[in-house]
């Protein structure tokens, strides 16, 4: 199943590093060829000799090795792989990856690679739960880094909790899943898609604006997944702190009116998905200069004007209307009823209802729980389990593929 696949395996320090020897053996049984980089910490737990014997390849350890650089430079090492697998991935190497550090061969290869990276973390439960590690993992995942584990259970340090390295069979399954998805069918080839994402910023004066808490994670994940399924994707994004999804044409805008203009400029399309949290209102008369505090304590009065509704405009755009228009409904109460009414009012085909009440963590968070409403027929409703926004994107895209297939 993995015949012809080249994997660069980076082994960092961790008591579970011994399990990676089994991973190497099983990957090789399936036809993969493996080059390995062993970090200084990794070499405390497994020997270069055992890794070399199992990979039947030289093991790379030193960035400053003249002979290694001459025969296989670190750039080539990272580029000739189809997948970079970091197992075990210690808290330290994950932090260095998130920060973009390159102070040894492993981190330099990781920074230099243009290939997908799969990490298998392992560490003490408190290290895993530490806000620094949480932030590093979120950063890496927002950049498209794939992850397997860690699992929960008894840890080598004697404590119990999340932090165990995924089992070799799970790591192998994640590698197989990666290649199956990469090499598998591309059901949306030939389809053009436009996705909106993030908040809009509506200026009050040259330095102030109205915004909301949308991070763009949901919209960006959908754009990435559509591209992976072979669609030609344009992502029209409000201001966000996310990297551009791979293989997606990204247009950055600020205001709702800019977003509408950009979406219209990219019509016609087959699929349009509106995940952006567009401001419903803008300031009627934006001040040309910074509004000054009045000396007498009088407060400024802001007058609002309604923004165009992008979803409704595109849903009702006649011959230019995409074959499938999907909106989101961000609701804090009566989620399904409000979403159903919103779908009918705006005229889109499907609406993905999500609860954005303050305790839901949906705005800006990692997970989302979606109720898909696909028309007037309540029988066709689907409640998806709470899952990561990336998993929501996958579920949506496979649903879209099925829609076009029937
Ligand atoms: O960005 P994240 O942090 O990952 O969070 C994701 C999300 C919560 C923002 C996303 O899942 C979501 O719900 N997006 C829609 C947010 C929203 O503005 O919902 P709404 O119910 O107000 O609008 C309904 C639909 O109309 C949406 O598809 C919206 O994009 C669209 N709309 C709204 C107003 C407007 N002027 N133009 C629009 O196109």
Image (tube, rainbow, N blue to C red):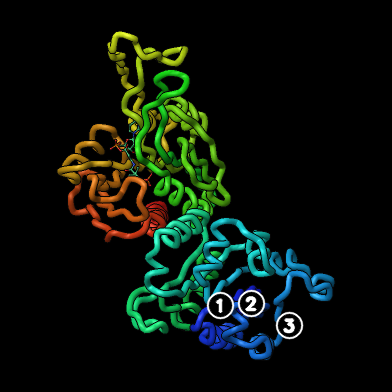
- Confirm or deny contact between disc 2 and disc 1 (CB under 8 A): yes
The residue to which callout 3 is attached is 58
Q: Nearer the viewer, mark 2 or mark 3?
A: 2
Q: Is residue 144 visible?
A: yes
Q: Nearer the viewer, mark 3 or mark 1?
A: 1
First in sequence, mark 3 or 1: give its number. Answer: 1
Q: Is residue 181 left or right of residue 159?
A: right
How far across and down, in percent of the image, does residue 22 sit?
54, 88
The residue positioned 52% from the left and 76% from the top of the image is 88
Q: CA distance from mark 2 to mark 1?
A: 7 Å
First in sequence, mark 2 or 3: give its number. Answer: 2
First in sequence, mark 2 or 1: give its number. Answer: 1
Residue count near mark 2 (Cα–Cα under 10 Å), binned few <14, some 14–19, many ≥20: some
The residue carrying mark 3 has its beta carbon less than 8 Å from ligand 1: no
The residue carrying mark 2 has its beta carbon less than 8 Å from ligand 1: no
**What is the number of the mark on residue 13?**
1
- The quadrant of the rendering that contains the N terminus is bottom right
- Confirm or deny contact between disc 2 and disc 3 (CB under 8 A): no
């Amino acid at each position: 199943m993995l015949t012809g696949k080249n994997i660069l395996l980076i082994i960092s320090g961790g008591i579970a590093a011994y399990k990676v020897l089994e991973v190497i053996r099983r990957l090789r049984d399936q036809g993969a060829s493996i080059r390995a980089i062993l970090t200084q910490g990794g070499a405390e737990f497994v020997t270069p000799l055992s890794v070399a014997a199992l990979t039947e390849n030289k093991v790379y350890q030193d960035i400053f090795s003249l002979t290694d650089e001459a025969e296989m430079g670190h750039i080539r090492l990272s580029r000739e792989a189809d997948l970079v697998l970091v197992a075990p991935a210690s808290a330290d190497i994950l932090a260095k990856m998130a920060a973009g550090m390159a102070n040894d061969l492993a981190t330099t290869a990781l920074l230099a690679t243009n290939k997908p990276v799969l990490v298998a973390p392992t560490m003490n439960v408190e290290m895993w739960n530490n806000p620094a590690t949480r932030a590093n993992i979120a950063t890496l995942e927002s950049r498209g880094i794939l992850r397997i584990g860690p699992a929960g259970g008894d840890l080598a340090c004697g404590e119990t909790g999340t932090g165990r390295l995924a089992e070799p069979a799970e790591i192998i399954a994640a590698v197989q899943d990666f290649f199956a998805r990469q090499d598998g069918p591309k059901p949306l080839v030939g389809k053009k898609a436009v996705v909106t994402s993030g908040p809009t910023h509506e200026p009050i004066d040259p330095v102030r604006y109205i915004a909301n808490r949308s991070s763009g994670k949901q919209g960006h994940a959908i754009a990435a997944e559509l591209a992976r399924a072979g669609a030609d994707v344009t992502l029209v994004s409000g201001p966000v702190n996310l990297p551009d999804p791979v293989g997606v044409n990204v247009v950055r805008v600020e205001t709702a009116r800019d977003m509408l203009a950009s979406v219209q400029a990219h019509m016609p399309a087959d699929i349009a998905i509106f995940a952006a949290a567009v401001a419903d209102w803008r300031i009627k008369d934006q001040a040309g200069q910074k509004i000054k505090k009045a000396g007498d304590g009088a407060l400024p009065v802001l007058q609002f004007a309604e923004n165009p509704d992008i979803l409704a405009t595109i849903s009702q755009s006649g011959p230019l209307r995409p074959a499938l228009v999907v909106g989101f409904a961000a609701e804090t109460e009566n989620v399904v009823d409000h979403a159903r009414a919103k779908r009918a009012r705006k005229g889109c085909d499907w609406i993905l209802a999500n609860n954005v009440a303050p305790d839901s963590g949906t705005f800006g968070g990692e997970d989302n729980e979606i109720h898909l409403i696909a028309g007037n027929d309540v029988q066709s409703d689907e409640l998806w389990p709470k899952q990561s926004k990336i998993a929501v994107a996958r579920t949506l895209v496979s649903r879209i593929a099925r829609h076009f297939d029937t």
